Amino acid sequence: MEMKVAPSVLACDFSKMGEEILKVNEAKADMIHLDVMDGNFVPNISFGPAVIKSIRKYTDILFDVHLMIQEPKRYINDYVKAGAENITFHVEAEYDVKGTIEDIKNQNVKASLSVRPKTPIEAVFPYLDDIFMVLIMTVEPGFGGQSFMPDMMEKVKKLRAEIDRRNLDVLIQVDGGINIETSKVAKEAGVDVCVAGTALFGAESMTDAVKDMQNI
Ligand code: DX5
Ligand code: ZN
């Protein structure tokens, strides 16, 4: 099966974000990954709903919002209004995981969960019946341009086995240090969706780079 590819705009040139989104559009990426950071859950600040809303008009590609923020439940409405079609939040960041998933889905938006490298994958097992995707971080969240952690593939394999055992169709996504080489490793482990920032926005041709990754 083809790998789904989600360029992460964290690596784009923010002074011309509209044009950068058009590149992703032209490349026929499967999703567009939007990293929201609060300087609290992660030691960095990126952008919020106003920026997401302003680029919504440049593409119809699925807006995959990755919330790296503490207490995401308080902010779900803002990201729905901004045009999110999937909202991923971290199990480590929210006390009311089930309620947050419900709040997202009640607004007809897909809900997904993420785990940091140190969090065991079993943390998402109780929610697998209710979510669209699991994002397994392959770097410590907070910054682009870090190196892929190959030992995270054990978590991918465990999750793949659990999804198959329960006959679910939850997608497995990885994020951090993904390039053409590491996306191959991810595919072998059972990943469905690769997020990549540096490798895609840094490529000479985004269209070729996305196509290569989709066909690895
Ligand atoms: C990191 C973010 C990633 C980041 C990936 O916390 O969640 O989405 O943009 O960047 P690269 O692909 O450069 O590692
Ligand atoms: Zn991300």
Image (spheres, rainbow, N blue to C red):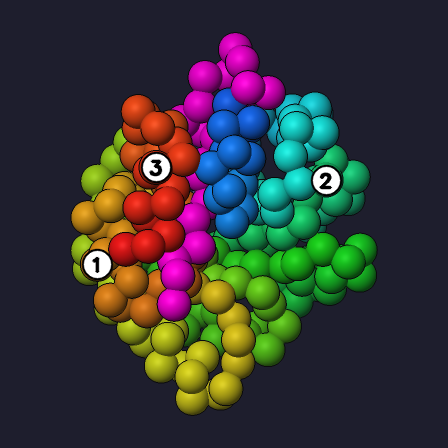
- Helix, strand or loop for disc 3: helix
Q: Position of residue 100 (x, y in %)?
A: 68, 58
Tell me the number on the disc at residue 185: 1
Q: Which residues are magenta?
A: 1-19
Which is more toward the observer, 65 or 142?
Answer: 65
Q: How many residues crowd around disc 2 within 10 Å: few (fewer than 14), some, or many (20 or more)?
A: many
Q: Is residue 156 left or right of residue 101?
A: left
- Left or right of 184, for residue 131: right
Task: Pinpoint residue 44: horizontal percent, then vertical percent.
Answer: 44, 27
Say above or below: 136 vs 162. above
Q: Quadrant of the N terminus?
A: bottom left
Name the residue: 55% across, 19% down: 19
Type of amino acid at the residue the image marks with label 1: Val
Q: Looking at the rendering, which quadrant does residue 75 occupy?
A: top right
Say the numbered circle drawn on residue 134. Answer: none
Q: Are marks 1 and 2 in contact (CB under 8 Å)?
A: no
- Mark with earlier residue (1, 2): 2
Residue named by callout 2: 83
